[in-house]
Image (cartoon, rainbow, N blue to C red):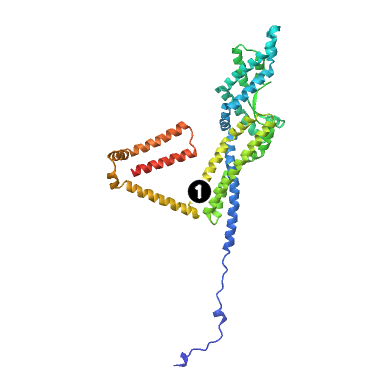
Amino acid sequence: MSPDDVMPAAGPPDPEVTAAPEVTAAPARPRLSRTRSITAWVLVVLVSVLFPLSVMTVWVVNTVTNTDRYVETLAPIATNPVVISHASVRITDELFSSVNVNQKLASLLPPKAKPVAVPLTNTLQDFVGKQVNRILSSTYFQKVWNNGNRRANATMVAVLSGQDTKLTRALKNGKTVVVNITPVATKVINTLDGKGITFFDPLKTLFNTNQKNVSVSLLSSQQVSQAQGIFNLVKKLKWLVPIITLVLAAAAVAVAVRRRKTLLRVTVGGSIGIVVFLTALHLARKKFVSTSVKEGFNSQVSGIIFDTLLRFLKDGLWLVLAILLVASVVLWFVGPARYAVALRGQIARACHWLARNARQLTSKEHTEGASPAAQRSAAWIREHRTGLRLLGALVAGLFIVFNGSLTFWGALAMLVTAGLGHLFGTVV
C-alpha cells in the first residue's frame, strides 16, 4: 500500500461544507383559509338579507311604478263582494245624507199620511241600495275602478317618491290617496230618473263640477309616511339590488374554501331571509289595518286592498323560496353527509330493483307466459306508443290553457306523470 492510498485522518468539519440547508417557513395556509371562511360567511349573511329585498325591488319596479301593471293588480278589488257591499253602502248613504228624502216625501203626502214618510224613506233607501249594488256588480264599475286607479297611481308614486306637488301637499295636510267612484253615483241617479225617482237630481250638478264626490280610500297620510322611505330608496336603486345580490352570492362561493357547502349556506340563508320577510309582511298587514281603522276606514276593505296590492310580491317571494329550498335539498343530497349518502344508496338500490324487474317483465319467458289479451294490449301499446305520448302532452297543454295557471305542484305532478308514462312506454 502506497502512502497515497492511506486515508487522511479525520479533521474538524468544514463549517462551509457541513452547514445545514436553510429551512424556508411554510406559508400560513390555516390563517388564509380562516380569512376566506370569515369573508364567505359575511357575504352569505349579506346575501340572505338582500334576497327578499331583491324580490321587493322587482315588485316595485314592475308593479307600483308601472301604471298598467298597477291597474291590473288592483282590478280584482272591483269584483270583491266585500268591497262592492262597502261601496254600495257608501254611495247610498252619500245620496240620502245629501238629500232630505224624508222631508221631500212628507211634503208630497197629505197631513194625515205624513207619518208614513219614514217607512217610505226606508223602503226607498233599500230600493236605491239594490240599484247601486246592481251597478257596482256590472262591468261599468270595473271600468270606473280601473280608470280611478290609473289616476291614483300617479298620485301614489309622486307621494311615495317625495315629490312636491299640489296633491302631495294636500296629502300632508291629512288627505288620503283615493279612487274616485263618483261616476257610479251619477249613473245611479240617472237610473233612478228612469224609474221616476228624481229626488237626487240636484246632486248631479255637484258631482259634475267636482263640488262633491264619492271615493274609496286606499292610503292615509300616516300610511304613506311609513312606506315613503323604503319605497323611495328601492325606486332609486331599481335593478341594482338584484344584481348586487347575485354578484355577492357568486363572490361568496368563489372566496369560500368549501364551495358546495357555501352555496348551500347561501340557499338556506336566502330561504331564512324570505321567511323572515314574509313574517314582517304579516305584521305589516296588521299595522296597516289598525292604522286604517284609526283613520276611519273599513278594516275589511283595508285588508283586501293590502292583500291585493301585495299579492304579486308575495307570489314572487314564495316562488323564490321554493327555488331556494329545492336548490338546498339538491346541494345537500349530492354532499358527503351521512344521511345523504345513505339516501343515495337507497335510491340506487331502488333503481337497480326497478331495472331488474323491468328486464324480467320484458324477457321472452315472461312474455310467452302472459295471457293472449295481455299480449295483444302490449302489442297495441308498443304500436301506438308515440301517439299516446303526444296525447298526454296535448292533455297537459289543454289543462294549462283552460285552467289559466300552472302551480308548482301541478307542474311537478305533470312531470312525474310524463316520466312514468315514458318509463311505461319504454318497458312495454
Taking 404 as reference, is 191 above or below it?
above
Across and down, in percent, residue 230 comes to 65, 40
Taking 45 as reference, is 285 above or below it?
above
Characterize the local packing of mark 1: few (<14), some (14-19) or many (20 or more) Cα atoms within 10 angstroms.
some
Name the residue nearer the viewer: 75 or 240: 75
Q: Residue 240: tell me if it is visible.
A: no
Name the residue nearer the viewer: 328 or 348: 348
Name the residue nearer the viewer: 210 or 358: 358
- Location of mark 1 (residue): 329
Q: Quadrant of the N terminus?
A: bottom left
Please name the residue shown 45% across and 93% down the image.
2
Across and down, in percent, residue 35 comes to 60, 58
Across and down, in percent, residue 365 comes to 28, 47
Q: Residue 387: tell me if it is visible.
A: yes
How many marks the image carries: the answer is: 1
Across and down, in percent, residue 177 comes to 66, 30
Amino acid type at circle 1 is Val
Extreme residue in the right direction = 173
Taking 376 as reference, is 181 above or below it?
above
Please name the residue shown 27% across and 39% down the image.
372
